[in-house]
Amino acid sequence: MSKLVLFITKKKVYGLFLIIGVSLIAYRIFDHLINKVLLRNKSDFEKKRAVTVLSLLKNFIKYVIIFFAVIFILDLYGVNVTSLIASLGVASAVAALAFQDTLKDIISGTTIIMDNYYVVGDFITYNGFTGRVTQLGIRSTKIQDFDGKTYTIANRNINEIVNLSQSVASTLIVVPVAYEEKIEKVEKVINEVIDEVLTWPTVKKDTSYKGIIEFNSSSIDYGLRLYCSPGEIWQYQRDILRLIKIKFDKYHIEIPYTKIEVQNGKGKK
């Protein structure tokens, strides 16, 4: 028992546990304070941004605490930390030259957060790929499309990213109708569709019928402009097309399509 007490009371033993304990307590305190400050009295949009900043800030603080804990532990065991830190400074300069792209990603990641380019939950488009931001890190951003495919973007490509979530989303829906149908009848039905669509959640009042878009070889193209909250535009577009088909069937309005006439090859004798 005396040997155990003697072992525990050694500076290198109790000092190690003390450093680890203080580090854990410090992280818990910072974690609590950060959560309290960043998430208090925030709107939904501000909370989205705060959660993103929170994740990055917690990681940063964690690594800072680990760094200092390691330095104190090495000093406890007699390692010359002054020369070690000086060596790390030289190594950092060499690493900066070797990992320029990584540094660009880190700087861009910080810029994305501080300048509010986008946050977790936003819909963005990059290189023709559209999806929701599922993870935002210092080096890269992960987005997931509606099929579950995940795309990882290096943060240095920030200038090529389009954010679809910080403004009202809009799209033009083109409806082809046969030339034989009366324009007044078609426009009346389309306006009925719009009146119903305007009752849907997050659809904006600017949603409206825009008139005839084009005369095609087999159809007159009518257009309506949809305005709604970002992230819902694709589903609303599908719902509107379905509603238009139901209404056209009800009022016997024909949507032109290619028809093939099949003959049995028997001629008259």
Image (cartoon, grey):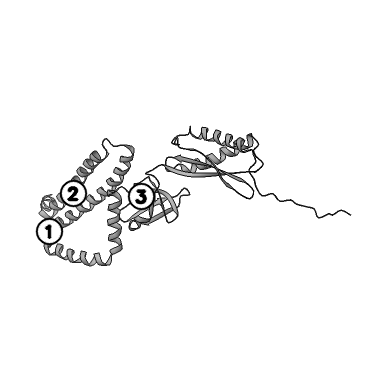
Q: Earlier in the sequence, mark 2 or mark 3?
A: 2
Amino acid type assigned to the residue bearing label 1 in the image:
Asp
As helix, strand or loop, the secondary structure at mark 3 comes to strand
Q: Is residue 244 above or below residue 76?
A: above
Q: Are marks 2 and 3 in contact (CB under 8 Å)?
A: no
Viewer-nearest residue: 92 or 201: 201
Question: Which residue is tagged 3?
Answer: 135
As helix, strand or loop, the secondary structure at mark 1 comes to helix
Amino acid type assigned to the residue bearing label 3 in the image:
Gln
Q: Which percent across, then down, holds residue 134? A: 38, 48
Tag 3: Cα neighbours inside 10 Å, few (<14), some, or many (≥20)?
A: some
Q: Give the quarter of the figure containing the C terminus.
A: bottom right
Viewer-nearest residue: 231 or 255: 255
Question: Which residue is tagged 2?
Answer: 23
Q: Are marks 1 and 2 in contact (CB under 8 Å)?
A: no
Give the CA distance from mark 2 to mark 3.
27 Å
As helix, strand or loop, the secondary structure at mark 2 comes to helix
Tell me the tag on residue 75.
1
Q: Are marks 1 and 3 in contact (CB under 8 Å)?
A: no
Amino acid type assigned to the residue bearing label 2 in the image:
Ser
- Residue 164 horizontal side relative to residue 106, left or right: right
